Image (cartoon, rainbow, N blue to C red):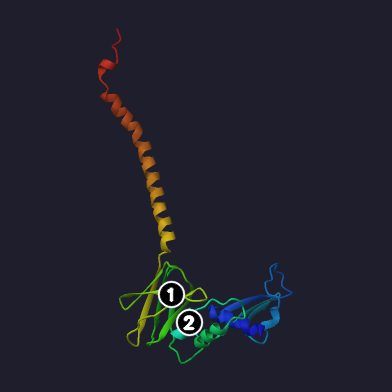
Amino acid sequence: EDARLSLLWLKAFGVGAIGISGKESKEYWRPFSHPEKFDGVLPALWRKDGVTLYRVPVRESGLAHVVPEGVIVRRSPKFPEDVAEVEKYVAALDDASLPLTQFQWEGRNRIRIRTQAAAGQALSVQVTYHAGWHAHSGGKSRAIAKDGLGLMWLQPGCNGPFCEIVMDYDGGWELRLCRWLSYAAWAAVLLFLTVQALTPLYRRHLARLTPAAQHPAVR
């Protein structure tokens, strides 16, 4: 049961592999109280010095999935065993009858997703929700919502057998504020350096304009 719950949560968050430090591991930090629970449950990809890397079986390797909108987790689970909604969501992730997606990172701040979706289906994106993310498809803006797991989902607005959704991250108001503060700081530095460079020239110019009467002639 412990392994089943762990596997459920791993799939819900889009984890493709997990490293487990066993009792024989030389690592100081061992976060798993029962490191053997995945033996015979998950295939081992690599094993050495008490550390095992297991593969989590998933239908799609990307982080975007078309699922029925009704299985989106709406309520945040209150404890690890509170998985009634999570089980329905993960079952949809494993449902071979649902459309596949192509998920691609384009740099750190853009995601491109290609898929197909019918009415009543939603696009679940296993990336942490942030208001700085914005989505567009079919030339229109698509609202991004936060699910009960803290991940993102949206209605893709597909109008045919092919749909492309582009998601861009601008950091939200926090990053925009930091960006403008950075611009202001650079402007202040440039202004200071300009004043420092021009002050001697300005003083020499004033000296040349000073009337000769203010300097008594030497007799």
Q: Quadrant of residue 13?
A: bottom right
Question: Where is residue 167, by image quadrant?
Answer: bottom left
* Residue found farthest to the bottom: 97
Quadrant of the rendered image containing residue 140: bottom left
Residue type at mark 1 is Ala
Query: What mark, if any, has residue 145 been given in the picture?
Result: 1
- Label 2 vs 1, first from the N-terminus: 2
Give the structural element (helix, strand or loop) at label 1: strand
- Give the amino acid type for the residue marked by disc 2 in the picture: Ile
Given residues 86 and 214, the one toward you in this image is 86
Label at residue 74:
none
Q: Residue at x 48, y 91 (%)?
A: 96
Q: Position of residue 70 (x, y in %)?
A: 46, 85
Q: Position of residue 5 (x, y in %)?
A: 62, 83
* Residue at (41, 85) in percent of width and height: 121
List x then y, in percent, for residue 64.
46, 80
Say which residue label 2 marks.
72
Are there few (<14), some (14-19), or many (20+) residues within 10 Å of tag 1?
some
Q: Residue at x 52, y 76 (%)?
A: 149
Q: Residue at x 59, y 81 (%)?
A: 82
- Image quarter hosting the N terminus: bottom right
- Local crowd size for mark 2, using a 10 Å CA cut-off: few (<14), some (14–19), many (≥20): many
